[in-house]
Amino acid sequence: MIRLAFVVAATLLCVACSRQDDASAPPTQAETRVEAKPAPVQPTSEGAFQTAITAEDFAARLQKLSSDQFEGRQPGTIGERMSTAYIKDQFERIGLKPGNKGSWFQTVPMMKVTVLDPTQVALAVNGSKSQLTLGIGADSVIGSLKGSPQVTLKDSPIVFVGYGVNAPDWNDYADLDVAGKTVIALINDPGWGNQDPNLFKGPALTYYGRWTYKFEEAARRGAAALFIVHETGGAGYPWSVVENGWTGPQFSLPSSEDPAPRLDAAGWLSEDAATRLFASAGADFASLKKSADIPGFKPVALDAKLSVSFRSGIESASSENVVGMLPGSERPDEAVFYTAHWDHLGKDESLTGDQIYNGAIDNATGVAAMMEIAEALKQQPNRRSVVFAAVTLEESGLLGSRYLVGHLPFAADKVVADINIDILALSGPSRSVTSIGYGQSDMDDYLMAAAKEQSRTVVPDDKPEKGFFFRSDHINFARVGIPALYASSGMDLVDGGEAAGRKAADDYTSNRYHKPSDNYDPNWDFRGAVQDMDLLLAIGRRLANESTFPQWKAGADFARPAPAQSRTSAP
């Protein structure tokens, strides 16, 4: 997903890390290699890869991973088998060792749930003012998170619960029993609608604003169903992303791995559909939406009932994380992780024209970059081990990385940090670097030091309300206390400045993100991707040759578990 950034205030720009730990460690400078825009890159022929990071090698791997041959890299398909075999072969060719306790693969168990005959499914609303039918697609999406083969709701009372949050000093479910009822909730956090800076974290999304939390909380309350009202600003993506993401199989970890309560029926409503649903009950959606941002909000029972019936195909299946490793020369039991998700949305044969969601930018760029970095790091010994994990099921709720973190091949307190790569910029080099979740950990200091060597500035995410820090695989490392870095090119492009950067970002979001049009383009400007790979290589090399462990900042949302032995913290 695209990350947008403003230039940070001058006080932030002067923060940098100058630690000289382990003076004999290999150099960590991120070489600046911004040249004039070249002719279209010619991808390297297979078997002719260089040991250094190059645009040609990166392009070859990116082109391969996003080719039609891989059929959109959907878990559980031939596209998965093609993808994981290719990643494993590349890891082995580079010279990595199997990284999961002697194996290249880590099997992730999953439940695969597919709504059958979705065109025949509809939400029937019996309101006091009118009756309404909402179809699946433009109006709504639905699925069974519990994995029930048959779900039937008959005249389920409908309740509006604001943002559906139960947090300290805020409870949208106060004094309400929703057992057996259909709940409707807004996306994002309380205070989002009126931009109240004093509620939760102001404009910055918290975990309470994530759709995954809202479904879990409604299930804990015994609700029969929950529908989240989509809003592009609050969600961070248009309705088409929801519609595409909920079309076809839905995946989850089995209850043995994830015992959290789950809903029989869960889904989303478009904002227009929600407006019509509330009107059928004689209620004004816009007015009730505003009331949800005011402290003291109480849930509202609508004068309407919902009925829906649908069948699902249920399969027990599995997918694979691919894990390679460079063993450390001195402290092999300590590990730096790089992660990038290989999965995407697969193939939709109901579409006319292009049916394959190739996912070139999202996230073949990340996997190709991880390979490039691995090859460069392989050229000299590293004191600590470095693990490269191409994880699955990111598009299905970050499930592959969640399983990985729950079954780490290293002791959790020996994992130094995670560097996550989810989408690299292909619009040219940038003068800035965006840190998603800026201010959480010492990893910002590492980023600033490496960026300084490239004459670049580090800026915080200028769209914290989108919650990007919670939307990629690094968050599962953070939840168990392992500092994580999620960085991307900023908007201030060398060629064209912020105007050009925002134009490229808007074009991607509107025309490529989670669409079949996310295809490899030979005319992309790879200079920015090379710049960012150099940056992330330098950070990983530094971490792999130090003895210190990055820590969380004071006031961060996370904390590293108490170490088994005394360690030095990064300044």
Image (tube, rainbow, N blue to C red):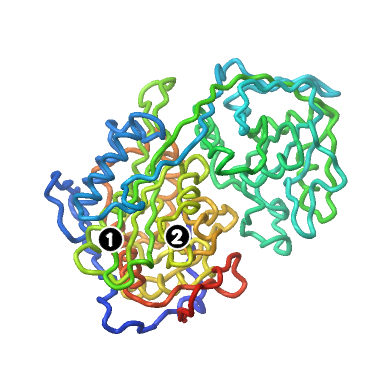
Percent coordinates x, y for residue 111 in the rendering: 52, 33
Indicate which disc residue 486 carries: 2
Percent coordinates x, y for residue 117 in the rendering: 55, 16
Select label 2 or label 1 by which is in front. 1
- Can the viewer see residue 141? no
Q: Please state if 202 lies on the left or on the right of 26 as rendered.
A: right
Q: Residue at coordinates 60% horizontally, 15% vertically from top-left?
A: 120
Percent coordinates x, y for residue 287 in the rendering: 80, 42
Q: Secondary structure at mark 2?
A: strand
Label 2 vs 1, first from the N-terminus = 1
Which sits in the foreground, 342 or 276?
342
Q: Secondary structure at mark 1?
A: strand
Q: Which residue is mark 1?
A: 326
Q: Please state if 183 lies on the left or on the right of 519 as rendered.
A: right
* Amino acid at the residue labelled 2: Tyr
Which sits in the foreground, 564 or 463?
564
Which sits in the foreground, 319 or 155?
319
Q: Please state if 135 lies on the left or on the right of 99 as rendered.
A: right
Q: Residues within 10 Å of mark 2 (few under 14, many from 20)?
A: many
- Can the viewer see residue 293? yes
Q: Is residue 329 above or below residue 110?
A: below
Q: Residue at coordinates 44% horizontally, 55% vertically from top-left?
A: 408
Percent coordinates x, y for residue 226 in the rendering: 70, 35
* Amino acid at the residue labelled 1: Leu
Q: Residues within 10 Å of mark 1 (few under 14, many from 20)?
A: many
Contact between labelled residues 1 and 2, with CB atoms less than 8 Å apart: no
